[in-house]
Image: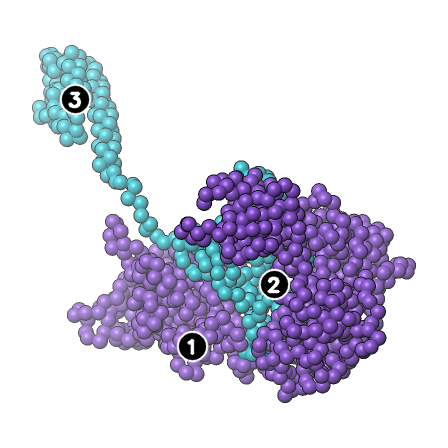
Chain colours: A purple, B cyan
Amino acid sequence: MRVPVSWLRELIDIPESESARDIGERLVRCGFEVEGVEESGAGLSGPLLVGRVISIEELTDFKKPIRWCQVDVGDGAPLGVICGARNFAAGDLVVVAPPGTTLPGGFHITARETYGHTSNGMICSERELGLGDNHDGIIVLAEGSPGDDGAKVMGIGDAVLDIAVTPDRGYALSMRGIAREASIAYGVDLVDPGLTLADLPAPDAQRQPHESGSDALDACALLTLRTIRGFDPSAPTPGWMKSRLTAAGMRPVSLAVDVTNYVMLEVGQPLHAFDETKVAGPVRAGWARPTETLETLDHVVRALHEEDLVIRDDRGPLGLAGTMGGRHSEIDDSTTDIVLEAAWFDPRVVGRMARRHKLSSEASRRFERGVDRTLAPYASARAASLLLEFGGGVYSGMTAVEAAWDRPVIEMAADLAQRTAGCEIPVSESIEALTRAGCEVVSDGDLLRVLPPSWRPDLSDPADCVEEVLRLHGFERIPARLPMAPPGYGRTPIQRLRRVVGMTMAAMGSVEVLNYPFVSLGDHDALRLPLGDLRRRTPRLANPLSEEAPFMRSSLLPGVLAAARRNRGRGLEDIAIWELGRVFFLKDGQSAEGSDDPIRPSVEHRPSDEDFAALEALLPDQPQHLAAVWCGHIEPSGWWGPGRQAEWSDAVDAAFRVIGAAGAEATVVPGVDPAFHPGRTGQLVIAETVIGHAGELHPATCAHFGIAPRSVAFEIDLDALATFASAPVAPVFSTAPVAKEDLALVVLANVAAADVAATLQAAGGDLVEDVRLFDVYEGPQVPAGYRSLAFALRLRAHGRTLTPEEIVGVRAAVIAAAEAAHGATLR
Amino acid sequence: MSAPNKSFDPKSPASLNAEAVTGMVDSALVAIASATTLEELKEVRLAHVGDRSPLSLANREIGSLPPAAKAEAGQRVGTARGTIKQALDDRTAALEGERDSRVLLEETVDVTMLSRRRRLGSRHPLTTLMERMSDVFIAMGYEIAEGPEIEAEWLNFDSLNIAPDHPARTMQDTFYVGSPESGVVLRTQTSPIQMRAMLTRELPIYVVAPGRVFRTDELDATHTPVFHQIEGLAVDKGITMGHLKGTLDHLASAMFGVGIVTRLRPSYFPFTEPSAEVDLQCFVCRGESIGDPERPCRTCGSEGWIEWGGCGMVNPRVLRAAGVDPDVYSGFAFGMGVERTLMFRHGVTDMHDMVEGDVRFTEAFGLEV
Ligand SMILES: [Zn+2]
């Protein structure tokens, strides 16, 4: 809502000393977001005068046509002024800046010699006055007298407050509403234009006003029509009205349209004017019929819905109630007989209609937020009086239909404001505040009975009344104190896990990224997911940002790999990044379209356990995953020597570290994941549950995502990992002397090293403290198809030194076990 | 080597008299002092205390002395050897020290060849900022509540007093999952976590809820369709707006410096009543830039206050939908944008930096904010 300050001052007596900014700040404290204060013509100093052009002499001796004008500016002799514009004629009223005036932008006007004359000033354009960009010609005024203050006529020096109105404050989308708030803030009186019935002449005795009706009194509880006949369609809109409309952000059109807009801005009641000659029979409100269509003022032919509320005549719909009028009953430049509609429509009905037709208008914005239920006849009287004043015609009276109205009374505890604020607020202060807001308040023991004013449909609960009281009391006067929360239990295990995982990843030199969770079919293809893969069963957005990426991610890899590509695109070769976030899977039985009849429990009470479960059942699975990728070097090269390329084992090692940090222990077995290299991927397994994959990415995956070949990655289901986390138990370890035994075992190349290590460990029992694979050899020294695995064993007994016989015994036992289990031979 | 002299030889060898021995010591000490390398010192040692050195030769003569003279001569030679040995040891230590220093000097490198050998890892500043803000609440006894990102529309809107036709729904442009009628949305706010907390936790409730939320905005310098909020909720007997203010002031102090406060401006949110906008006192200029064009403040635009979030007293309708009796319990709730907080707290000027995953941005934050 754009609020010209001069208009506001006309409605209430704000002290002259208050600047536009001061007023804005007051309104901010009342809960209005003042997004800006615009001052027109800022920088202007010195007089501007209204002048009448007496004569024009065309000077033709120059490169462009120039005019030498004599302009009457009231007192004294006419001013001779040189002017290059051509959009005016002798007799026109113009705005003259005489010598001594400084225009916005610092342009100082002096008498100067030019084009062979002494030019005593300048005839101004809008741009020169800082009023707009229009520089096509100079300003030609519609009214005024030579010598008038041009600044005042042009509204220069007026400020406009740009106010964002919250959806509960429909009444504040008007000068009336803002003036009421300001009157409360300043403690000054308001003569409410919405409660003042304009004087109208006695209705024409000869002709009846146009007939009205409502077939939907529930949604259109009040419909008024005032009829004016014999109106002069060529009558101009007065300048002050035009400049106010412009300042408020509306474009002047014609007197009839401008008056309806002006009254809407003034009191907040949207109005609609019909051309009576284009209407057949009574004007009624009613529901649309399914097959009906309507061409609205914006030239769109709309198919109507049976929940659309329309205004109709005997032939069909004339307009969408409170949203937009129809093109065929529109007033035009020959309209003489005007039917002025003012009504109250149900906010929900208008809101739904505006959304259904994607049509947000000045009218629908107001009806959606709730228009004063009693305002219509006042607003239309005001509009009718303006039309008659400036456009003439005969007033024919009003017809109306209205449903009964049960005004709600709010019962609130008298001390509720005090209890809510937590500081002393006397009941008398509550009563006074509510009364100033327009409520009628009756004190009844411990209760206040509050009848809100017709323009405050947002006041429906005791809490709403409390807000009125505290707003006026001033939030800043409520003393701050801290509540005493009971002791808590700190972070939950999964919350601690996320933190330690983040620290672990960062300590390994990897950088966290936070990607959007939207993916495309192409991303699924790039991960090489086969049809039927669970990761293709993912929720889909009905209104995605991009039709390209309508799916919710089921893997973090697409996002992480795309981020790697972005970094690569910016010239970074060696990349290590990770992400921790939710992925999404449809549950069994859920479809991508979702439920067509979702449960909507009552909000009057707590949902039953069954209802809450039914709500949960609507949602997909959304586990938290962790994924990481390494491209290029994991250890950089430099003057110290060559770097080291990240390889599959780095990904497995990193995954193990994360799993270890979580307090779990995993094993790795050869795994298959379509996004990964078929021979270089490990499945991470804890207690027979696969919690993730780690290894080298499939070359096609790297190519699809545009990252370096042989990039490595892992992805882990953190929620699954969390279920295996356990508190560490302190180990019992021996300080007796150690015995070290190395052995190289030759096995078939497809025997898993981890299996051999496990066999050695098991066979050695308690005496084997550690088994470590330290070398792998394939080559001429071993038979083809075989490889040599070299293990370092650390042997130790408890509380004593191992005897040479024991050491020999363990060595023999583990070799024998490896031979039995894996066909291993000692190299 | 001479044979032991069993008979008494009245002669006393010239090499054993005091003058001779002193002379040997003196010449040894001179030689030791003038040795400049460990190799030279080795030669000196050989020459002056080696088997063929004058002193060793003199020592051998002791046996031929009469018993009465033996002791004296032995002592004299022993003292001489001790003196020389001490001098040798001292000199050796000195020369070794010099050599070691020289070696270290020779090992000098150009320490300016600094280059990053190990990668710098980091957590995302939004993650660490949320954690840090949560820490403030955990210290006050709050717990961290969480909820799903794909959320039931009923929990995201209806139960929070945002009915299907409520104009507030158009304030938040919602992603619908499946179809617009499916009853499932990407949560547009962290507030459904409040509702979940009230439905699943025992009263009283003190929780903080950080999380990711979604609105159908296009990404630009100041908007992103996927962003983060952190929200707080307290529901207890006798919770007041004063408590809300105290809690926000404490958060401001903890995050921006002791003494930094907040200010509330009346506003509107369907789930709170009364509702207010939260402004943070500018932690850079503390308001001193207001009206001082000489020292403008970029952080607050010389306004002295920074818009931070929204808050209010939990609407009794919301309490009722959660099964909490509003005649017995009251509550406050507040929420702020984490991206916005990061922007003004750390001077981030473009939202793209937070979402694109450029490691150069994130690395700058390390592990903490
Ligand atoms: Zn500042």
Lateral position of residue A203 relative to residue B207, left or right:
right
Residue B295 percent across, percent down from the top left: 53, 38
Which of labels 2 and 1 is toward the front? Answer: 2
Nearer to us of marks 3 and 2 is 2
Mark 2 highlights which residue?
A: A251
- Taking the spot 72% from the left edge, 75% from the top edge, the residue there is A337
For the residues tagged 3 and 1, is the chain the same? no
Q: State the residue lying farthest toward the left.
A: B2
Q: Which residue does the image show at 84% across and 69% down from the upper left?
A: A202
| Residue closest to the eye, A771 or A707 | A707
Helix, strand, or loop for circle 3? helix
Amino acid type, label 1: Leu
Question: Where residue A313 sits in the image (x, y, percent)?
Answer: 71, 83
- Marks 3/1: CA–CA distance: 87 Å
Whether ligand 1 has any atom under 8 Å from the Cβ at mark 1 is answered as: no
Regarding residue A8, the answer to whether it shows in the image is yes
Q: Which quadrant of the figure contains the C terminus of chain A?
A: bottom left
Q: Residues within 10 Å of mark 2 (few under 14, many from 20)?
A: some
Q: Position of residue A592 (x, y in %)?
A: 52, 80
Residue A524 relative to residue A645: left or right: right
**Residue holding disc 3:** B34
Mark drawn on residue A521: 1
Element class at badge 1: helix
